[in-house]
Image (cartoon, rainbow, N blue to C red):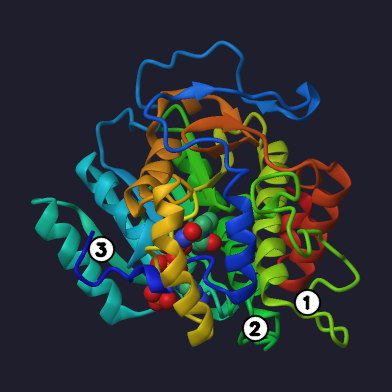
Amino acid sequence: MSESEPTPSDADHNATEQTDQTTEQAVEVPEPEEEETQVTSSGPADQVVEVAEEVDKSSNVVEPKDGGPKVVIITGANTGIGLVAAEMLAKDDYEVIMACRSEDKANQAVSEVQKKVPGAKVSFMKLDLNSLKSVRDFSDAYHATEKPLHVLCNNAGLTTGFSTKDRLETEDGFEMTFGVNHLGHFLLTHLLLDVMKKTAETCDEVRIVNTSSMLHDPEGPGGNRGRAAHLDFDNLMMDKPDTFDGMLAYRNSKLANCAFSVELAKRLKGSKITSNTLCPGFIPATGLGRNETQWAKIRMAVITPLLKLIGITRTVEHGGGMVHYVVTSPDWKGLTGKHSTDFKITDSSTESRDPEVGKKLWDMSADLVQYEAAKTL
Ligand SMILES: NC(=O)c1ccc[n+]([C@@H]2O[C@H](COP(=O)([O-])OP(=O)(O)OC[C@H]3O[C@@H](n4cnc5c(N)ncnc54)[C@H](OP(=O)(O)O)[C@@H]3O)[C@@H](O)[C@H]2O)c1
């Protein structure tokens, strides 16, 4: 990775509380990275939404039939997992649009990819998920380019600090973790659906790939310690007195990513657009933990080598590779509403696949971002 890559002290789980959780989680994470790709779906059959049962998995399905460029938008592509994914996809001849909030950081990232991948078609477009206006401006600007869109990677994400109790808000007054990680991407996806539908007429499949986290699942590694993810529709913004918790806000936002993806998959059935989620793995070497307290960062820096030794952590290349895998692999052809972890195909949590949860989140999100059209999809 780049010289500017965040150090392990900026790790994902570097909250004081989470450090303890991660230590305990160590015994629960089944195995280190596997090279092999397997299909291990074991979820209830009625929850698995498939576009087609018999599919030809021999080719890259998003390949445009007219031989034009394959275009991918990656949110949060200036660093971490998104940057690695951008490099990998540029190598595969995708035209990569880095949708980022900081022009300076994004331009540096563009240069970095161009240096590593000579001839890479990569560019920056401004997107700040903290602001619904910015999301709408991005969509307008993208429509103006008249480019197709073969893949949308909703990858950007933040935590305001796992161990903090300081509740922050977006420009539109949403709790920031939920607003950026879920609501911003909810609106972005809807605003770009027309372009994706049009593009689907020119290729076998268009893919929406959402970066979630294993922490969305109370039954998964790390998800069963402390306050487990759960969408409380009476307090989605965690603004009731004494309810805000940075870790819980993050877990819930990642649960919302999965519930949205599953519901979207259902609603897009038959459209040649698929929607899936992935967990990139626990990767201390990204900037996700940047808002942690100093103390939490120190604790995480101390514990990271141990976690690495026992195979709990994953590399940024693994995380970027996970995005690349769900975007490009023929294994995913015709699959929608599914989840991936460690290069396997699986299901997201039980709650994320509950149809009532999916519908309620959908309707409430449409109201919050003031996009009524979503309700008729
Ligand atoms: N690292 C892990 O252990 C881990 C585990 C599970 C899931 N994930 C998920 O992986 C995804 C990528 O995270 P990462 O680990 O690569 O962390 P990262 O290095 O901090 O990257 C996060 C990216 O999201 C961008 N972002 C944050 N707020 C934004 C906003 N308001 N508008 C637009 N972009 C924004 C950041 O931009 P700036 O650089 O400008 O802030 C950055 O490009 C996230 O969805 C995260 O939840 C990570």
Is residue 182 visible from the viewing direction of this image? yes
Q: Amino acid at mark 1?
A: Met
Question: Tag 3 or tag 1, which sits nearer the N-term?
Answer: 3
What secondary structure is found at the residue carrying circle 2?
A: loop
**According to the image, label 3 marks what residue?**
123
Q: Circle 1 sits in a helix, a strand or a loop, which is it?
A: loop
Q: Nearer the viewer, mark 2 or mark 3?
A: 2
Label 1 sits on residue: 237
Q: Residue 234 location, x and y as percent? A: 91, 71
* Residue depicted at 82% across the width and 61% down the height: 231
Give left or right: position of 71 versus 284.
left
For the N terminus, the quadrant is bottom left
- Tell me, yes or no, whether the two marked residues, 2 and 3, touch with CB atoms within 8 Å: no
Circle 2 residues within 10 Å: few <14, some 14–19, many ≥20: some
Q: Residue at x 52, y 66 (%)?
A: 157
Question: Is 117 above or below relative to 273?
Answer: below
Give the amino acid type for the residue marked by disc 3 in the picture: Ser
As drawn, the residue found furthest toward the right would be 234
Please report the residue visible at 56 percent of the width from the left and 80 percent of the height from the top: 131
Circle 1 residues within 10 Å: few <14, some 14–19, many ≥20: many
The kind of residue on which mark 2 rests is Thr
Tell me the distance, in whole angstroms, between the alpha carbons under discs 1 and 3.
34 Å
What is the x, y in percent for residue 298?
45, 79
